Image (spheres, rainbow, N blue to C red):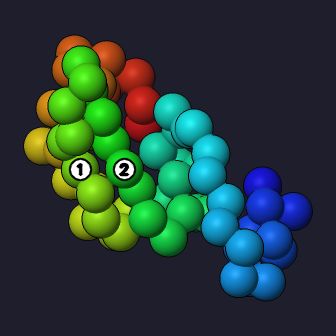
Amino acid sequence: MDVLREISEQGISVMVNLHSVELVRAYCTRVIGVASGQLIFDDHPSRLTQDVLQRLYGDEVSQLH
């Protein structure tokens, strides 16, 4: 992840698929969340709320923390 951050800091776009909310909050500057083919969230990770996580992960949200 540190290498990806360094690439991003050079102005190169980096796209990753993560399911770890902790990694998302630590490394990402933008989150696009999709569930069942629908866009649920497109914003900065600091704006990820419990409600958004519930909409993205459903009952599995309790396993993310």
**x%, y% of residue 39?**
22, 40
Secondary structure of the residue carrying tag 2 is strand
Residue at x 79%, y 83% (from the top left corner): 10
Dot placed on the residue nearer the N-terminal end, 2 or 1? 2
* In-image side of 63 versus 1 (left or right): left
Measured along the vertical axis of the image, is residue 60 above or below residue 48? Answer: above
Disc 2 vs disc 1: Cβ atoms closer than 8 Å?
Answer: yes
8 left or right of 46 in image: right
Q: Which residue lies furthest to the bottom in this view?
A: 10
**Neighbour tally class for label 1: few under 14, some 14-19, many 20 plus, Cα within 10 Å:** some
Quadrant in the picture for the N terminus:
bottom right
The answer to which quarter of the image holds residue 26 is bottom right
Residue type (three-letter) at the residue carrying disc 1: Phe
Residue 58 as seen in the image, left or right of residue 26: left
The residues tagged by marks 2 and 1 sit, at their Cα atoms, a distance apart of: 5 Å
Residue 31 location in percent, x, y? 40, 56
**The label number, if any, that marks residue 32 in the structure image:** 2
Q: Could you tell me which secondary element the residue under label 1 belongs to?
A: strand
Q: Mark 1 points at which residue?
A: 41
Classify 10 Å Cα crowding around label 2: few (below 14), some (14-19), many (20 and above).
Answer: few
Q: Which amino acid does label 2 sit on?
A: Ile
